[in-house]
Image (tube, rainbow, N blue to C red):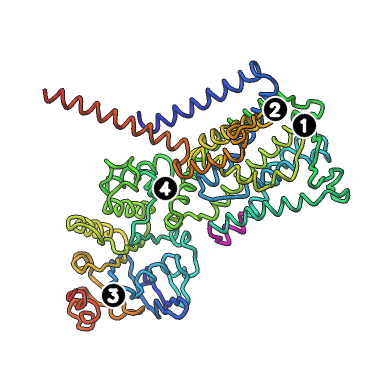
Amino acid sequence: MSGRNLNLLGLILVGIIGLVFMWLTPRFAELDTVLDLTVYMIMAILALSLALIWGYGGILCFGQAAFFGLGAYTYAIAMFNIGESTIPFLLAILLPAAFAALLGYFMFYGRISDVYLGVITLTVTLILFNSVNSTAGPEFHIGVARLGGFNGIPGIPPLNLPFDKNAPISLEGMFYLSTGALLLTYFGLRLLLASQFGRVIVGIRENERRTELLGYDPRVYKLATFTIGGALAGFAGCLFANWGSFVSPTIFGLAQSAQIIIWVIVGGRGTLIGPVIGCIGIQWLSAALGANQPSGGSDLWSKVFANAPLILGVILIAFVLLMPKGLVPTLADVGQALLGSRRRRKQRGLEAQQAE
Amino acid sequence: MAQPLLQTIDLSMHFGGVKAVRHVNFRLAEGELRCLIGPNGAGKSTFFKMLTGQLQPSHGQVLFRGHDISQAYAHEIARRGIGIKTQVPSVFDGLSVRENIWLAASRICSGERARRLVDEMLERIGLTEAAERPVGQLAHGQRQWVELGLVLSTNPELILLDEPAAGLTHEEVLKTAEIVREINRSKALIVVEHDMQFVRMIAKRVTVFNQGSVLVEDTVENIMLNPLVRDIYLGKRAAA
């Protein structure tokens, strides 16, 4: 089977699994589970935003949480002021995209090196964390929306059907919306990456100087990629604010920023499905380990297994050391090696038959 | 006198106190093939980097078809029609040969035309069979062809080749010389090369660089006989 057919088969498979999952889950699962799965879907969109800019664009952004948090806060603040969700929803995508474009402009046109890019994006996230964290007083408000500082903003009204504030989206509706959005984001990015734009950004990741010497301006392509990544993260942030009806500064925290990078490392850079699997798998594991905590036994092993950050840390180190390419690319390599050896065996068999 | 395709005026490049290129005045006619020779550190590669926008000159001008490109970005210069094959093959190692060539071809055309151009180029560089293999897995010589394919696919008017024969087998050197002559039928070339046999195979005129400036410029035959050139460059190489 050629690479092209395999690719197509993978796409069809993802589509079918996604649609079946979306259709069956609310019918068979408890509401609690549906709610948990909703947040996995939302975070997977966030993972895809970094998969695009880091995995394909080669831009290591430590600050994807900045755009995610901005999306969530923009939605919350706009929603309290406007009361109808269409414009807040759009603002929650546009504002983080504009912020990413501005930040990206200075970084890429200023020819900042990769290491500093990581430092700058992380710093921006932490500045946002500290700024928002210190807005607890009543004097900090935008319109009627109080920023709430470290207490966050509770009771955020849910999304409604476009231009109809009397038709809020139900919890189940949020599941459909998030899963549908994840599938659309996935397929949209696949299309983008198959286009000339997508191939050029991969070219820039592979060899920026050569891309430039062929006549492409890497700054334009990097800026566009970074902006799209910011918009996607903002979109995920908006859905996240909806999901919990709550947003707090921890969304800009170091833990949140690091987590996104871990999803991509574990799932595999240079793929889209990898980070989605990494994100969902790690969140599921964190939840499962967290669930152990209250009822954890008193012996050493149950204490160790109840310590989610410890287990996740071990997993991350194991992946970096043993599977640096990540889950999906490593499985693909193993698959290809197996296929190759089968083909060779078959060929040897044929040669042996011919010899007889 | 007709306007030269490329001209440098008083071109200089300083790195701190080190003067890598000093007051170079260079002219290349339309369709000409020129070789640059000179000892290591003579400033040839720096000169190439200034012509392609990888370095901005400290002083002087680079005129391409009369336009000053000395302060232009590398991608702007590439779009004006100067392509470069670097000394160490600069290719997209993680992509297949076909994807490499396509990336170059799709800058100037799209769709079916780009695909046709890619197929023709694969044929021309003799890598049709290896089209789907990642370039990182190819041998050094083949990666050189891929890079040449990349440069040719963007259809430049002037091609700079930095040591195209380095590290190649004798057969590959002969093939490279043939390809260079073939390219020269429609394009101008500047070739930096140490291998004098190769230079004799391809060039009519040679410019000798030494310590950042042009030492002498003459026909290849006269260069080989020039006592000064023999002394500072050819003699040492012969002795080595």
Circle 2 — which element? helix
Q: Which residue is mark 4?
A: B103
- Foreground residue among B123 and A223: A223
Query: Can I make out residue A64 in this image?
Result: yes
Q: Amino acid at mark 2?
A: Met
Please give the residue where the numbered disc 1 appears in the rendered image: A158
Q: Amino acid at mark 3?
A: Pro
Q: Is residue A185 visible?
A: no
- Which chain's residue wears label 2? A
State if disc 2 and disc 1 touch (CB < 8 Å). yes
Residue B22: x and y in percent read: 40, 80
Instruction: Say which quarter of the image contains residue B61.
Output: bottom left
Q: Amino acid at mark 1?
A: Pro
Q: Are marks 4 and 1 on the same chain?
A: no
Dot 3 falls on a residue whose secondary structure is loop
Badge 4 element: helix
Q: CA distance from mark 2 to mark 3?
A: 70 Å
Residue identifier under label 2: A174
Q: Quadrant of the N terminus of chain A?
A: top left
Chain that bears disc 4: B
Name the residue located 32 percent from the left edge and 51 percent from the top edge.
Answer: B146
Label 3 Cα neighbours within 10 Å, binned few <14 / some 14-19 / many ≥20:
some
Predominant SS along the magenta part:
helix
Disc nearer the start of the sequence (1/2)? 1
User: In this view of the protein, which residue sits in the foreground, B83 or A311?
Assistant: A311
Label 1 SS:
loop
Residue A148: x and y, percent?
82, 45
In the image, are marks 3 and 4 on the same chain? yes
The CA span between labels 1 and 3 is: 73 Å
Q: Report the mark closest to the observer, 4 or 1.
A: 1
* Lower sequence index among marks 3 and 4: 3
